[in-house]
Image (tube, rainbow, N blue to C red):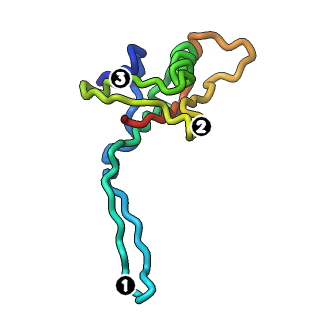
Amino acid sequence: MSVILDSIDITGLVRADSFPSMTEAITEVSSGGSIIVFERNILFSIINLTGEKDSGWLTLTVLKELQALAQNMGSIYTLDYEGELFTVRFRNEEPPAVHGDKIINRSNQDGSDYYNNIFIKLMEV
């Protein structure tokens, strides 16, 4: 399995949303008591990439590279998830778009230090 985001190797992360909904529905009750259903197709999908406590660890260097990409407002990237290509943007409207927890809490963090509980929020465009 390989996962690459704009040439940054994030292999080990998995999609938390394997079967995203592509239809949205809202229901209301009319003044006569009937149910009215409004449905529409969603033309984008949410992609959440995650790592857990014991898997999908990333180094501080990789997390900083991802955060730098996320800070480029309006930028679009290519996600290669197991050979399937997606055109994505970071979901900065749901901060933080990139998150990880220190495994070892120390004051002099090094770029090779690992982080777990990774969460990357993307949106297909």
Q: Residues within 10 Å of mark 3 (few under 14, many from 20)?
A: some
Instruction: Please name the residue shown 35% across and 42% down the image.
Output: 44
Q: Amino acid at mark 2?
A: Pro
Q: Which residue is mark 1?
A: 34
Q: Position of residue 12 (x, y in %)?
A: 39, 25
Residue 114 visible, this angle:
no
Residue at the disc numbered 3: 78
Give the mark toward the camera: 3 or 1: 1
Labels 3 and 2 touching (C-beta < 8 A): no
Relative to residue 15, is residue 97 drawn left or right?
right
Query: Can you see residue 35?
Result: yes
Query: Which amino acid type corresponds to the residue marked 3 in the rendered image?
Result: Thr
Nearer to us of marks 1 and 2 is: 1
For the point 54% across and 29% down, the residue is 98
Residue 107 vs 39, above or below: the answer is above
Residue 111 appears at what percent x and percent y? 59, 10
| The C terminus - image quarter | top left
Which of the pair 32/13 is nearer the observer? Answer: 32
Query: Where residue 23 is drawn, which disc sits there?
Result: none
Taking the view exactly as shown, the residue that stands out farthest to the left is 83
Q: Is residue 33 above or below residue 78?
A: below
Residue on which the image places disc 2: 95
Picture coordinates of residue 86, whole percent (x, y): 31, 29
Q: Does residue 62 appear left or right of residue 38 in this picture?
A: right
Mark 1 or mark 2, earlier in chain: 1
